């Protein structure tokens, strides 16, 4: 990915998440985009990137062979929201993740948005289960049949995403 594309994606997340969270999430997106294992799916309108979603590896420590991803962040430029861009990147992502043999995708996010694409609340642990106060916001999408049922125990996101504040649902709206 070239520098211009990275900058455009980082800006999409900064603006999508607004004043309160935008800078933190833009930082996260930039870190993720620098990692070889990150999957990045974007949508363009009017010749520019207006929506993007990133996926980074998510590990179940007792199940090293499971191929799971964490979805974060997912954002659409404010002026393009509500016109199908989010739907487009979610559908393209699921198709791509299925094609690369992913077992499951996890997300800590809006419980009214992700279920549209098959995500369901999950009882699997986040990396900081003690900080989980909104269990409906922690969801999974199974891509390989039967894979999620087998998963249990401690989990880990990539190091840059292991700071507790990302997982403390009492701090987020
Ligand atoms: C959430 C977001 C990615 C959705 O993208 P979008 O382009 O606006 O969504 P779409 O226009 O493709 O809408 C897809 C569907 O989701 C619904 N939807 C959109 N935003 C939603 C939200 N915040 N909560 C619940 N449902 C939402 C739409 O009504 C639409 O439903 P329909 O298919 O039944 O008509 C975008 O609004 C955004 O960037 N928001 C700010 C950042 C954010 O909250 N990201 C997710 C955090 S986990």
Image (cartoon, helix red, strand yellow):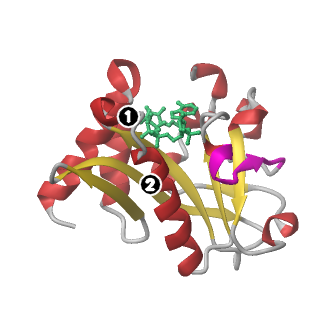
Q: Quadrant of the C terminus?
A: top right
Q: Which residues are magenta?
A: 115-123
| Mark 1: C-beta under 8 Å from nearest atom of ligand 1 | yes
- Secondary structure beneath dot 1 equals loop
Q: Which mark is residue 42?
A: none
| Mark 2: C-beta under 8 Å from nearest atom of ligand 1 | yes
Q: Position of residue 19 (x, y in %)?
A: 33, 19
Residue 15 horizontal side relative to residue 55, left or right: left
Q: Is residue 164 above or below residue 61?
A: above
Q: Position of residue 83 (x, y in %)?
A: 39, 39
Residue with the mark numbered 2: 88
Residue 91 horizontal side relative to residue 65, left or right: left
Give neighbour class at mark 2: few <14, some 14-19, many 20+ (Cα, 10 Å): some
Question: In which quarter of the view is residue 86 placed?
Answer: top left
Residue 35 horizontal side relative to residue 92, left or right: left
Residue 134 horizontal side relative to residue 98, left or right: right
Q: Position of residue 42 (x, y in %)?
A: 34, 57
**Circle nearer the N terminus (1, 2):** 1
Q: Which mark is residue 81?
A: 1
Q: Is residue 132 above or below residue 88?
A: above
Give neighbour class at mark 1: few <14, some 14-19, many 20+ (Cα, 10 Å): some
Q: Is residue 92 above or below residue 18?
A: below
Q: Position of residue 20 (x, y in %)?
A: 39, 19
């Amino acid at each position: 990915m070239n520098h211009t594309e990275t900058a455009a994606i980082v800006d999409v997340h900064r603006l999508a998440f607004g004043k309160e969270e935008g800078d933190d999430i833009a930082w996260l997106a930039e870190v993720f985009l620098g990692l070889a294992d990150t999957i990045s799916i974007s949508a363009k309108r009017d010749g520019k990137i207006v929506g993007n979603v990133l996926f980074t590896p998510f590990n179940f420590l007792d199940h090293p062979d499971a191929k799971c991803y964490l979805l974060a962040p997912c954002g659409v430029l404010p002026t393009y929201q509500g016109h199908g861009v989010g739907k487009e990147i979610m559908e393209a992502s699921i198709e791509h993740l299925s094609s690369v043999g992913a077992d499951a995708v996890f997300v800590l996010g809006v419980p009214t948005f992700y279920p549209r694409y098959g995500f369901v609340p999950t009882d699997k642990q986040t990396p900081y289960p003690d900080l989980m106060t909104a269990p409906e916001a922690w969801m999974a999408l199974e891509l390989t049949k039967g894979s999620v049922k087998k998963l249990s125990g401690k989990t880990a996101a990539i190091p840059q995403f292991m700071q507790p504040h990302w997982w403390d649902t009492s701090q987020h709206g």
